[in-house]
Image (cartoon, rainbow, N blue to C red):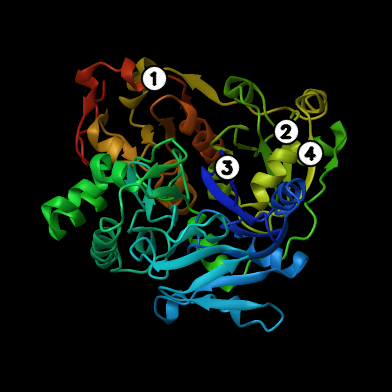
Amino acid sequence: MFFRQIFDPKLAQYAYLIGCQQTGEAIVIDPERDIDRYITIAAEEDLEIVATTETHIHADFLSGSRELAERLDARVYLSDEGDADWKYAWADNPAYDVTLLTDGDIVRIGKIELEAVHTPGHTPEHLAFMVTDVGGGADTAMGIISGDFVFVADLGRPDLLESAAGHVGMMEPSARTLYGSVQKFLELPDYLQVWPGHGAGSACGKALGAVPGTTVGYERRFNVAIGAADGGEDTFVKAILEGQPEPPLYFARMKKDNKEGPKVLGELPRPVALSAPELAALAGRTDIAVVDTRVDRSAFMTGHLPSSFYAPMDRTFNTIVGSYVEVGVPIYLVIDDALDEAVRDLVRIGLDDVVGYATPETLAQAASIVPLSTIDVIDFERAIELARKPATRLLDVRRMTEFEAGHLRGAQCIAHTRLLARVGEVESGKRQVAYCRTGSRAAAASALLRRLGHDVAYVDDQILNVAPENLETGSRAPAIAPV
């Protein structure tokens, strides 16, 4: 049996390529949309991808299953669990060879068997897959591809149907369903390997581990979320729902698109290089998205094209652009040497209209044609001084759980991944002072606020530097006394 775990570090997502080396057939589980990576790996191993499957309707990336069906005529296996709201609409298309799976169904790829196990809670239709290498002489599974059910050190969050997809009233029932799935998981043998759908950094859980795999026995002993089930269903429900971070804004769109069928991508977008005059002509336009990807955020604050978004080319790139840029808006990148990486990152979250790019050097040349914008950079000491002025408002762009643990007095909390949707709550006519824990999230939020017409100062400082007397806990806090 051939087994390869393929990792996307920005979305912290694992896809799996499993092949039968005796027959040369392979299947991809939970593929992302730029499928050439899987095709290349399979070819290097003398395998042909003949099928694709998914553990569930994903919210954090666009699935590549339809892409594989289009390009390779691959068979598609999709869950038929859950009620009518959780069926794959695109599975009805007669152009595709689709088999719908329910609990206990077997998918055979050569002499490899994948048994579907219904594991609802994260989503109603969720499946895990028990993997058995029949060709290798095994008569029992060696591992389980757990999707967004069991992670290393965590469980898939059951609140997303409500907090991201907008299905009101689903949070607690989903948590109770997840409790039942955990009981099923605990019946599995300790030796069974667990291959999760995500690792550390994913927004699909609270505290995912960075190790790429685990075992049932290890998670039984050390997974805090699973351990909460020892206290009974009510204790588990309270523990699993408490402290879940605000989901990125684009999760609702991903869920809808994956259900209805992602747009067929074909080739990757090929953005064209812009000259300095062409880049300068984009200054101030809000009908397009100029995304500045320079990792040095001080360079962005010192000078950027007016109305630019700021999304550094690091692990936060997808999350920021996905939360701030809407589908169909033409995207222009200010980027150095990671153009292919950025394009792949964007199509994985359904942002295909990447039409142009310019280097930081081109931006410097454009500065002689059009004035660049700046954003004031301050520290927390200065932020506290400004907060005493009636014309200033403090905006904390961390998660609510962080905010409640300790924030500047009088601050308003809007998570940076939800800011675009809640920008109407930001008081107009006041200077906004945006801060977070280290300055990373506040940098992106400050750029968005400036683009939307707000006067803003950006706090590039560590919140650990703030004296305790200037912090308040809880969701409400009195304002700093004016001078």
Q: Secondary structure at mark 3?
A: strand
Quadrant position of the C terminus in the picture: top left
Residue position marked by numbered label 1 in the rendering: 462
- Identify the mark nearer the N-term, 2 or 3: 3
Tag 2–tag 3 contact (CB < 8 Å): no
Residue count near mark 3 (Cα–Cα under 10 Å), binned few <14, some 14–19, many ≥20: some
Identify which residue is drawn at 67% across, 35% down.
306
- Identify the mark nearer the N-term, 1 or 2: 2
Three-letter amino acid code of the residue under disc 1: Gln
Residue position marked by numbered label 3 in the rendering: 7
Distance between the alpha carbons at the discs numbered 3 and 1: 31 Å
Q: For marks 4 and 3, give the one nearer the viewer.
A: 3
Three-letter amino acid code of the residue under disc 3: Phe
Identify which residue is drawn at 78% across, 60% down.
266
Q: Nearer the viewer, residue 32 or 366?
A: 32
Using the rendered view, name the quadrant where residue 109 is placed: bottom right
Distance between the alpha carbons at the discs numbered 2 and 3: 18 Å
Q: Secondary structure at mark 1?
A: loop
In the image, residue 169 above or below residue 21: below
Tag 1–tag 4 contact (CB < 8 Å): no
Outermost residue, left direction? 231
- Identify the mark nearer the N-term, 4 or 2: 2
Number of labelled discs?
A: 4
Q: Is residue 9 visible?
A: yes
Residue position marked by numbered label 4 in the rendering: 357
